């Protein structure tokens, strides 16, 4: 099967060794695109895919700005960039350690920025391209006990909005995909920042809140659903600004558009703080 593209067939994917990034790399390569995927920890290889495309995996740390820029500038082409690399920190806003907060932003925001900037430069010069950023529903509604993660995803929303306006004159489009609960290794690799001491002000509620999140994620959608959304964007001359994944999340975003802030907070408290 050949994937339709208004932008070209050269695809660059970050976070390509697992989860959503891996699913995106595979679906593009399986639909006739030539994909170069990067990750900090991956087996370096190149293979032809049944759909006529190719998949090349290389090691690269997105937090190393100079290395990422050099890598992207040497790519044979960058028509579509799918930026998926990310990690999660959970814990109370009051007590999350500053070094963990910086790590959260370093990977999720600055890691995306490091990859986006050289990709956008190449797209501008060739007068076409598509930037796809993997955000989160948590970038539209802040999740209690995940304030730092939500902040990093909120930042990606603002960045992508600005890119879309700035780059349109150069034939470059940008879109942010907003997955909800998704079944990936992200859940088990989430960094927890709270005390195991039951006398701690937050320990009990934080454990219960994160456990609820983890359960929802383990029973969530396949990362393939996010990858299919990304592939569909390649065939759109004018892709939407943002794409929530799944009917329930599209409906939720529509509902929240007309819900007062107090109403939103009430719903989120019931979901994540009033756990039994």
Image (cartoon, helix red, strand yellow):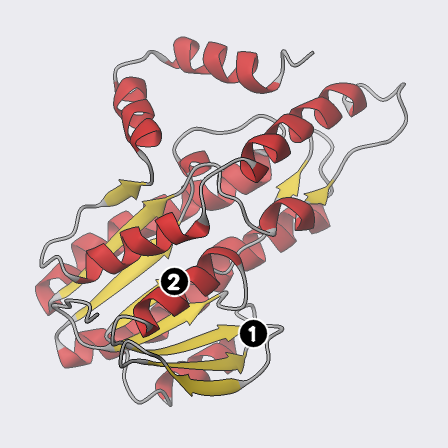
Q: For the point 49% across and 42% down, which residue is it?
A: 182
What is the total number of numbered labels drawn onto the structure image?
Answer: 2
Name the spot of residue 87 as percent of width and height, x first.
Answer: 58, 52
Drawn side of residue 160 relative to residue 57, left or right: left
Name the spot of residue 191 as percent of width and height, x first.
Answer: 70, 46
Where the C terminus falls, by quadrant? top right
* Residue highlighted by disc 1: 64
- Mark 2–mark 1 Cα distance, whole angstroms, equals 22 Å
Q: Earlier in the sequence, mark 2 or mark 1?
A: 2
Asked if the residues shown at circle 2 and circle 1 are in contact, with their CB atoms under 8 angstroms apart, the answer is no
Circle 1 sits in a helix, a strand or a loop, which is it? loop
Where the N terminus falls, by quadrant? bottom left
Query: Front-most of 243 and 114?
Result: 243
Dot 1 crowding, Cα within 10 Å, few <14, some 14–19, many 20+: some
Residue 238's quadrant in the figure?
bottom left
Of badges 2 and 1, the one in the foreground is 2
Query: Front-most of 271 and 144?
Result: 271
* Residue highlighted by disc 2: 24
Residue 42's quadrant in the figure?
bottom right
């Amino acid at each position: 099967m050949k994937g339709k593209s208004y932008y070209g067939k050269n695809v660059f994917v970050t976070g390509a060794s697992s989860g959503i990034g891996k699913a995106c790399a595979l679906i593009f390569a399986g639909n006739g695109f030539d994909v170069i995927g990067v990750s900090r920890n991956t087996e370096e290889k190149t293979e032809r895919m049944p759909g006529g495309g190719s998949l090349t995996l290389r090691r690269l740390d997105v937090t190393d700005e100079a290395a990422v820029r050099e890598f992207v500038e040497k790519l044979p082409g960058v028509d579509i960039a799918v930026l998926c690399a990310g990690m999660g920190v959970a814990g109370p806003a009051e007590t999350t350690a500053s070094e963990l907060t910086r790590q959260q932003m370093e990977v999720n925001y600055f890691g995306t920025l490091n990859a986006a900037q050289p990709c956008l430069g190449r797209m501008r010069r060739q007068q076409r391209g598509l930037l796809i950023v993997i955000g989160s529903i948590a970038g539209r509604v802040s999740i209690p006990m995940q304030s730092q993660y939500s902040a990093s995803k909120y930042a990606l929303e603002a960045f992508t909005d600005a890119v879309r306006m700035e780059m349109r004159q150069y034939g470059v489009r940008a879109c942010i995909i907003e997955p909800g609960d998704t079944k990936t290794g992200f859940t088990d690799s989430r960094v927890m920042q709270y005390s195991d001491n039951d006398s701690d002000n937050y320990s009990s509620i934080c454990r219960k809140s994160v456990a609820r999140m983890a359960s929802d994620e383990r029973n969530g959608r396949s990362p393939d659903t996010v990858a299919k959304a990304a592939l569909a964007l390649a065939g759109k001359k004018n892709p939407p600004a943002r794409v929530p994944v799944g009917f329930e999340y599209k409906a939720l975003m529509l509902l929240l558009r007309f819900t007062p802030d107090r109403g939103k907070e009430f719903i989120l408290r019931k979901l994540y703080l009033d756990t039994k």
